[in-house]
Image (tube, rainbow, N blue to C red):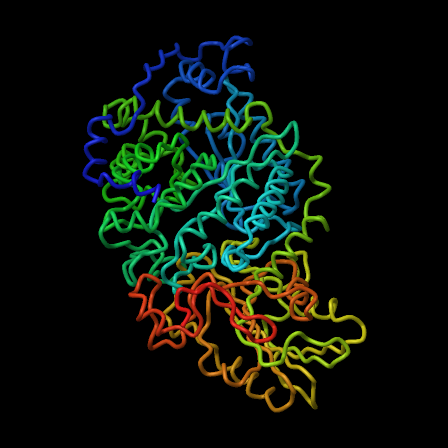
């Protein structure tokens, strides 16, 4: 295995390397300190786009004061810092957290807002553009009118690298239209436990598949957008091991919810853990990814934000990462000690830019003081800023910092939505079929369940708000019910009753079940909580005698427990969280397109026997109804490449 050579040699060797290499800081000559506020000549080398990136970086770095350098290392939230703060503090970055948007939430409002930030940054002495970041994790889903793709777990089911690349390209164009060139995506956690609230954001439990699909997506994000556009900067996150934390190890509590897995502790032999979780990072670095986000989680008890062995020793030295490390939302503040200790620990460990949404002024003050006292070496500051500037120059942000307004006309266009509809169809995973599918046009179809006609529910977390939304008022698209009506055509009688109370008879009944939206640790669940609720079971029981064929469609970011209903239905379809284009599901239900989705995670048979993906294979396989790789075709024949194939 090619990766093994880069991570073995063991962590002991990494520790020795850190000590010998001054914590991974470059030994390039220290830039000469410019006199404070020295005027910058118009022909300064860093302003010349024809010059090599590294030469531009060194020229600019040599002209910067400590305040300007630390400003570049600081990221504030848009609701907390306006253009005035960007200009006064020379901030390097601004972000939108989940649900943080201008009013009205329209593409041109975003473009106007971000261009105002750029105007303020470009008016400073050095004219360094800000880099605006956002979690565009399944399309540019924070903006009303965006194309909302399936959540990544669905794309893992599709398993189509070319499609992932095209999704990246569409997302990049919609980002650039609003002036955003930094995407906090993809998440390359190798998910070991479906109880995790971020399983839906992941690309499944197989590291090789995660690597292949994430690499394709990144290549799409980084593809040329327009001759006068900057390149999108992807982010590999969350470094490292966030998909394998131990149950009950999290100490985080948000919104009154005690996290159980998210932000917890990944435990075990470090070499074995690196073999499992590091390959996707190596793949994305090889593809040119220029930023990596540190994980909230811990590694054998040590918070990643302060783990020098992993951030500097493994990521920067062993893997040769030349980009920059961004902290997660207030992640530095989760380290032990005072804020002063936390800041010094994170920066010395290898964090290059701090996501300090509200506390950006305090961060600047504390880090400045730490440098002046020698707690954080000047060399470490120069290394961090060098990495940030290198990314900004390489992506063309100095030449093209503003929104690509010519792309606003194609924002959420029919062409973009066609890619999303294809993604929905390819992600849908057929798990059982006893002659119920494909649906026949001209028949009577009765649809039930609260997930049938709710764009918010079918889109999941991070859509418009951090925890997602409910209803059809804000997301532009077609619900799953609307898709069935559209694709079925005028000759197909489709009726809907959410509670499943059908008066009379129908040829086919379709019950939609699932989970309401959530994000991160708010979605951590006991395995028993993944069972269908009483209303869903009642709807299935009530319909069984009133329809000839009964189809169950699951709308969720992870498997649900179906042991109480599996024998009562004729077909089971996992729709995942399909996003805005509900007609894509109808395309496969009616047989216009084949079912090609395969499970990217195992599907437990029941709560009592649940086993994580890292459990011994014999125990794991015995605990599953369907294994990763499983699916069936419309004739009911098992297909796929499951490691549990009997």
User: Is 532 left, or right, of 150 in this rendering?
Assistant: left
Residue 83 in which image quadrant: top right
Q: Who is closer to the viewer here, 28 or 500?
A: 28
Where, quadrant-wise, is the N terminus in this rendering? top left
Q: Who is closer to the viewer here, 586 or 577?
A: 586
Q: Residue at x 69, y 38 (%)?
A: 407
Measured from the top left, where is residue 630 in percent x and y? 48, 67
Residue 546 in which image quadrant: bottom right
Where, quadrant-wise, is the C terminus in this rendering? bottom left
Q: Residue furthest right?
A: 490
Q: Residue at x 32, y 61 (%)?
A: 614
Measured from the top left, where is residue 201 in percent x and y? 47, 55
Q: Residue furthest front?
A: 646
User: Is 595 left, or right, of 516 in this rendering?
Assistant: right
Measured from the top left, where is residue 235 in percent x and y? 46, 41
Q: Residue at x 63, y 84 (%)?
A: 549
Q: Is residue 173 above or below residue 453?
A: above
User: Is 530 left, or right, of 537 in this rendering?
Assistant: left
């Amino acid at each position: 295995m090619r990766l093994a050579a880069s991570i073995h040699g063991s962590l002991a060797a990494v520790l020795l390397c850190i000590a010998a290499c001054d914590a991974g800081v470059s030994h390039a000559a220290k830039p000469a300190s410019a006199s404070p506020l020295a005027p910058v000549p118009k022909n300064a080398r860093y302003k010349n786009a024809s010059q090599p990136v590294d030469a531009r970086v060194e020229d600019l770095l040599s002209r910067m004061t400590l305040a300007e350098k630390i400003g570049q290392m600081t990221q504030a939230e848009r609701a907390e810092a306006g253009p005035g703060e960007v200009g006064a503090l020379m901030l390097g970055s601004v972000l939108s957290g989940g649900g943080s948007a201008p009013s009205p939430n329209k593409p041109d409002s975003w473009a106007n807002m971000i261009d105002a930030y750029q105007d303020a940054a470009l008016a400073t002495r050095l004219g360094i553009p800000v880099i605006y970041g956002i979690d565009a994790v399944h399309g540019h889903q924070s903006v009303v009118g965006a194309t909302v793709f399936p959540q990544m777990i669905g794309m893992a089911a599709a398993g189509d690298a070319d499609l992932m690349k095209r999704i990246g390209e569409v997302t990049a164009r919609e980002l650039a239209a609003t002036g955003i060139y930094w995407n906090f995506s993809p998440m390359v956690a190798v998910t070991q436990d479906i109880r995790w609230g971020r399983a839906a954001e992941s690309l499944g439990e197989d590291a090789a598949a995660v690597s292949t699909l994430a690499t394709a997506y990144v290549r799409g994000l980084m593809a040329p957008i327009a001759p006068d556009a900057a390149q999108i900067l992807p982010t590999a996150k969350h470094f490292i091991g966030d998909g394998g934390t131990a149950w009950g190890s999290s100490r985080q509590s948000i919104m009154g919810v005690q996290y159980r897995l998210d932000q917890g502790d990944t435990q075990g032999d470090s070499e074995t853990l690196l073999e499992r979780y590091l390959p996707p990072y190596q793949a994305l670095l090889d593809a040119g990814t220029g930023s990596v986000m540190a994980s909230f989680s811990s590694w054998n008890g040590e918070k990643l934000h302060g783990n020098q062995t992993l951030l500097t020793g493994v990521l920067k030295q062993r893997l040769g990462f030349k980009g920059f490390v961004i902290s997660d939302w207030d992640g530095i503040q989760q380290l032990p000690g005072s804020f002063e200790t936390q800041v010094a620990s994170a920066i010395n460990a290898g964090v290059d830019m701090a996501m300090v949404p509200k506390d950006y002024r305090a961060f600047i003050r504390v880090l400045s003081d730490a440098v002046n006292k020698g707690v954080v070496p000047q060399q470490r500051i120069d290394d961090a800023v060098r990495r940030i500037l290198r990314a900004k120059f390489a992506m063309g942000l100095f030449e093209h910092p503003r929104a690509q307004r010519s792309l606003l006309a194609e924002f959420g266009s029919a062409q973009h939505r066609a890619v999303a509809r294809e993604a929905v169809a390819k992600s849908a995973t057929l798990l059982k079929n006893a002659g119920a599918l494909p649906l026949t046009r001209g028949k009577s179809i009765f649809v039930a369940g609260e997930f049938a006609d709710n764009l918010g529910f079918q889109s999941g977390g991070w859509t418009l708000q951090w925890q997602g939304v409910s209803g059809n008022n804000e997301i532009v698209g077609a619900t799953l019910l609307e898709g069935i009506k559209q694709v079925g055509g005028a000759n197909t009688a489709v009726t809907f009753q959410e509670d499943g109370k059908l008066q009379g008879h129908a040829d086919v009944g379709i019950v939609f079940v699932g989970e309401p939206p959530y994000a991160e640790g708010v979605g951590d669940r006991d395995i028993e909580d993944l069972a269908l609720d009483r209303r869903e079971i009642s709807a299935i029981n009530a319909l069984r005698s009133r329809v000839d064929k009964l189809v169950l469609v699951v709308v969720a970011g992870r498997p649900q427990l179906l042991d109480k209903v599996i024998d009562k239905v004729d077909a089971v379809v996992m729709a995942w969280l399909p996003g805005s284009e509900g007609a894509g599901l109808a395309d496969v239900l009616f047989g216009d397109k084949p079912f090609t989705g395969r499970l990217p995670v195992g599907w437990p048979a029941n709560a009592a026997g649940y086993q994580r993906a890292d459990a011994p294979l014999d125990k794991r396989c015995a605990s599953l109804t369907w294994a990763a790789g499983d699916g069936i075709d419309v004739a009911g024949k098992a297909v796929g490449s499951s490691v549990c194939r009997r």
